[in-house]
Image: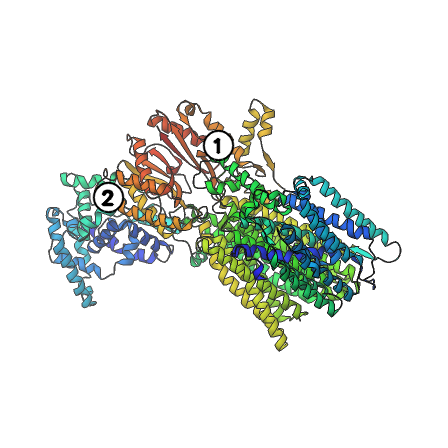
Amino acid sequence: MQNFNSQAAMDREFSPSIVGSAPHTPIRMNSIEEEEDAISPPFLAQQDSAITGTTVNSPMHVTKPLVFSTETPPGRRPNSFYSVQGGNDSSSSLVATKGFTFGGGSDNSTNDTQLINGPTSDYHTHSKKPSFKYVPAPKLPPMSRNRSPVRHNRSPSPERKSKRNSLLFEAPFNFSSSALQPPPLSGSSNNSGPSSGGTNGGSRSAMFRKGHRYKHSSVSMNFFQEPEVKEPLNIIKSLPVPDFKDLRNNLTWPLTHIQISICIVELLISIFIFNLGHQKGWNLLGTLCHFLTYDVLGGIFAILTELLAKFEIWKTGTITLPFGLNRIDVLLSFAFAISICFAGLDLIFHVLEEIAVLFAESSTADHHEEINQTIPHSHHTHLHQEQLISWYSVIILAATISFLSYSFIFKTTQYKIKNPLITLSYLFYMSLYPILSHYHRGWDMLATAVISSFIMSYGIQVAKWTSTILLMGFSTASINNTLLMDIASSDSNPNEVSERVLLKRSKSTLPIAAVQTENNQSASVQLDPSFVKSKIYDAILSLPLFKRTCSLKNNDLLFAKVNFQMFIVLIKIEMKNGSNDDELDLRLTIEKLVSDYVPNAETTIEIERM
Amino acid sequence: MVQTTDSSSNANTLLSRIPLTLLYPTLLLSNNLILTVHDDILDQSANHVPLLIQYLVLPIFASCLITLCSQVLRTFSNHALTLVISFLIIILNLFLGPVEASTVSVLLLQLVTASEYNLRKYAVLPLLSIGIDYYNNSLSFTTVLSYILILAIIFSSARSKKSLYYLDHIKVPKSALLSVSCISLVIMYLWVTLSTDNQTKITKINYSMLFVFLGCTLVLLLVCQDIKTTLDNQPFATVWQNQYSATIIGFMAMVLQYLSFNAISSSSKSDFLTAVFILISGILPSSLEYENQGYHPKEDENPDKHCQHQLNEHEHEHSHSVSTHSHTHDSKELLENEKEFLTTSKLLMSLATNKETKSIFSFLLLNSAFMFVQLLYSFRSRSLGLLSDSLHMALDCTSLFLGLLAGVLSKYPASDKYPFALGYLETIAGFTNGVLLIGIVIEIFIESFQRIFNPVTILGTTELLVVSILGLLVNVVGLCAFDHGHAHGEHESNDNMRGIFLHVLADTLGSVGVIISTLLTKIFKSQIFDPIASFFIASLILLSSLPLLKSTGSSLLLKVDDKKHALLKNVLNQIVSTPGVTGYTAPRFWPESTSGNSHGHSHGHSHTSSNSHEEENNHSHESSHSHTESPVEAKSKSNSSAKPSLVGYIHVQYIDGENSTIIKKRVERIFERANIKVWIQVEAQSSACWCRATSMKDQAIII
């Protein structure tokens, strides 16, 4: 008896502890719970209503602590005791504790609901008065528990709960097992649930528990078998997209803060440089300021993607976002590549304008000054000897901050555009400018044109590459090409093979842009997608398992890259006279083969048996 | 300007011809300005250029260049004829000056293609031009010579149509044209440099004008190609077989002349005579008769029917390609479009022939024509504001072109590199346009902030006003074209068109803003209005482009919308409740892009209907499993023609010992009913697969 009392006390402690822990748990927990409720309404709803009755010893509320703690008003508790005191052996609340009334459960249930509803409203009208009366009541439940034989095995263990809580603390958004577990049989019970147990929520769950308890009874055997049949669904129907608050709460302490402060400092510096350039009439600084601002924007996006990557939705496919939020990374890279192209084009236009001015000057020498003033962004910056110090100090300042942002933000993140490199190259040009401008204006224009064409080609390359992914094309940038090369060289006729190998050495800029994961050492070599595909196609066709009975059309082999990491491979095979085992063998072999060529691929092999 | 044509009274044809009225005079004017006397020489009227250079080398150069361009672009197939015609026109141009030459050349073309004409009435024109020359103090042999030349052409073409027939079939190799034009350019250059030896520079080659000339030629040829596609089976000659076309061209030439020289001619009397000349050119052709209808059998007799010929050739190629390609690719619904996408060389052709993008392509041409006009004017007036504006115009043209290109490319069939075809390309183009708009907005914001704190006095407000009003007109035409094009396509689904529309709208707003702020500045003499107006316009653009970015972005993230989400959920529930299935893993489904479908409306219908079928079948499914077979068959047949709403793959697990084929068939049927294109991997519950491996990080594992 003592033992039970202490246990009851522990049980009593549970709900407050959970309530206390609620602020620590991730913010999105509740919304997930709601989502899940929406998916599988009958079961959980019944649980909730059952909990209102037998909060203390119901094993179910272990799995749903948050719902319990948030949704059950404290006033409900006396309610159940009221029914206990009344000596009513209702099915919803007391069958579970007293037992052996399931035969007439359905009849009683209607009465129960009335009984429960009555006192509840009664209680509410009487405000707090009854709460005093029922304070000592917690002693009562153990009496009912005495009779439950299985009780010890199923005692709601505090360890389990604490484990779960700690899990939540460690990885706030790694929704694992219990929180997201849809009820078994959600699909079918959805249909049958409302009709059978819709009127009284309590009775069904009570019967379920009954089934658990009296597993030796012939009647309850049915209930026991039911949930085993179906495997739980391995898909989350939707995950919440984190909002700003979530992001703010999940900053990694030193790193993100450093990154953000670098961004802010860089922004301030760019504003300062802009003002300085305006004051002194150094128009080159205006362009530099543009690039710095691009750095800041890129940095903000990089930080954002890094933060987002911590959330479950980043990686996990849901129905709403089949490949997770991961593609945001690709999309942002693409947008940035486009804007970089825009910047490059802008520069080229300025050069063109200057050339036009040169033409105009050559014809009318006297209008020179007048025209020069009216150019909005002329790069014709006059530098005097004494101004060189401030010129170089500005360059050093900008170089420092952009190098910092490169090493802290862009190097560590997965972000595919390395903006600061552009800024640094422009700064390099600026440092040469005083020397260049001594000679001829043509040099200056030439250098600007070269830089802007470099920027544009870089931007176009990244845009091409990312847009291939956005179009769900077969981007071969991170394909394991060493294997392909081996196969190619080991082939019988090397000459013929070298003709077929359509290797494209990419430009020197691509290594910056390419994904540098561990498993592809030479990302700079790009392969022709058709070549890779034909290689894999040939490899599949030459499988001994395949040769006998199967056929595969070239069109039925699809490769696509859906984000920076993941490929999908879709294959449709026709098989004649195969057994289930043959099918399995073939599937596993092909899967192995494909994963050798294409890392991190999701392979789907549809086998049509004739 | 608007009444260029009444032949087809179609907005499309009208739109495609507007650039012609701009380009033709610009072409002639720029050609005349390639070789000019240096500004420093006071005696402008004196002839410093030797006749041989001016009237032989330069026309040869120009006509070779034009023919070369037309060969590269494949506008006209009969090279020799193009060469001769362009040579004659340019000679006329050099003899008479751009205003008269443009009018006379159009009249000449009318006469040559006419079946019946009264030449005596035209005697007024030579008299008028001699009068103009007389008051211009530039009376010379050239005028007389040019009219003699015209007469010779008319008679020779009337007499011996055979000779023209031969001309029609002579092919001139590209290399010859290139070398001839290069040689003539070198001769001109040498002459110009050698002639400086005497004293100061007398003449010069205007490279900027050369550039404008080249650009105009290219755009003009593109416009011709565009017009040919609108004409369908009519001969190309209908373009100028309009009573007023000469007048309109002449008027435009006069305006351009005025803009670039600030005068039409040197005296007011000759100005008046020029105006009369142009007016008369509108009256004279009223008696002309053309026999357009019965032309097909003897089309070769007419020098300018070559386009018709060319068009037939194209059709031949197309039909041929259809027959070859329909075998290799078995995509049934794209058959109609497919013929256009065989080679990249026909890309332009498909751009122009595509019904949806047709009007926008015309607008693109108009825009680029206007750009060249602006460029010419800015070079003439040395105004940098205009120069930067025309460069902005170039950016617009680029983005328009990219959008159009995306629209055409997106209908390409799937390839190894793009297994899901290029349907999302249009969305990407829309997104790109949105990003570019944001970039422009940011530029404007920075600029206007700068202007608020450091006001810049704007010089040359009148000129700015003229140009921005012209730009506004062009953009309004563009908006009309857009509306017209939109009447065919649907508004909401096509992000690409939305992006282009927003771009044009932004330009229009920009011109309006410039006009208003310039007027206010003129009235109140305060410089604050310019930044305020630009700020206001920038925020308007920003507000309109954000929704575009949002919608394109979410569809590029492959987001499944609520309707399809519900459909998919329903399907998944059905799969779970299918007997023998224990569960499924890795259901990844994404929406199929709509742009590949040319009929958006039918698509929408099929979608909703498939949804309702879904519901229906669901109910019947619950009641009895075996009964649903026959209606399902019928429905799946009706749905199979429609485009799938979703594409994706799924792994389905079944109880060990079940027949996988039957399970697969059942699941397949569920997807078929929902009109979802799917790859299904059916696997035994106990078998291994990556999708159920516990170590998979990317997968939410639920135990």
Marks 2 and 1 sit apart, C-alpha to C-alpha, by: 46 Å
> Quadrant of the image for the C terminus of chain A?
top left
Mark 2 nearby-residue class (10 Å; few <14, some 14–19, many ≥20): few
Q: Are marks 2 and 1 in contact (CB under 8 Å)?
A: no
Q: Quadrant of residue A504?
A: top right
Q: Which mark is residue A596?
A: 1
Where is residue A121 drawn, in percent x and y? Answer: 18, 64
Q: Is residue A120 left or right of residue B695?
A: left
Residue B519 visible: yes
Parent chain of label 2: B
Front-lying residue, B65 or B401: B65
Q: Nearer the viewer, mark 2 or mark 1?
A: 2
Height in image: A144 above or below A361?
A: above
Mark 1 nearby-residue class (10 Å; few <14, some 14–19, many ≥20): some
Q: Are marks 2 and 1 on the same chain?
A: no
Where is residue B436 drawn, in percent x and y? Answer: 55, 56
Height in image: B511 above or below A166?
A: below
Height in image: A398 above or below A59?
A: below
Height in image: A404 above or below A549?
A: below
Residue A180 visible: no
Residue shown at 11%/51% (left/top)? A107
Disc 2 is placed on an element classified as helix
Parent chain of label 1: A
Q: Give the residue type at disc 1.
A: Asp
Residue shown at 29%/44% (left/top)? B573
Residue at numbered disc 2:
B620
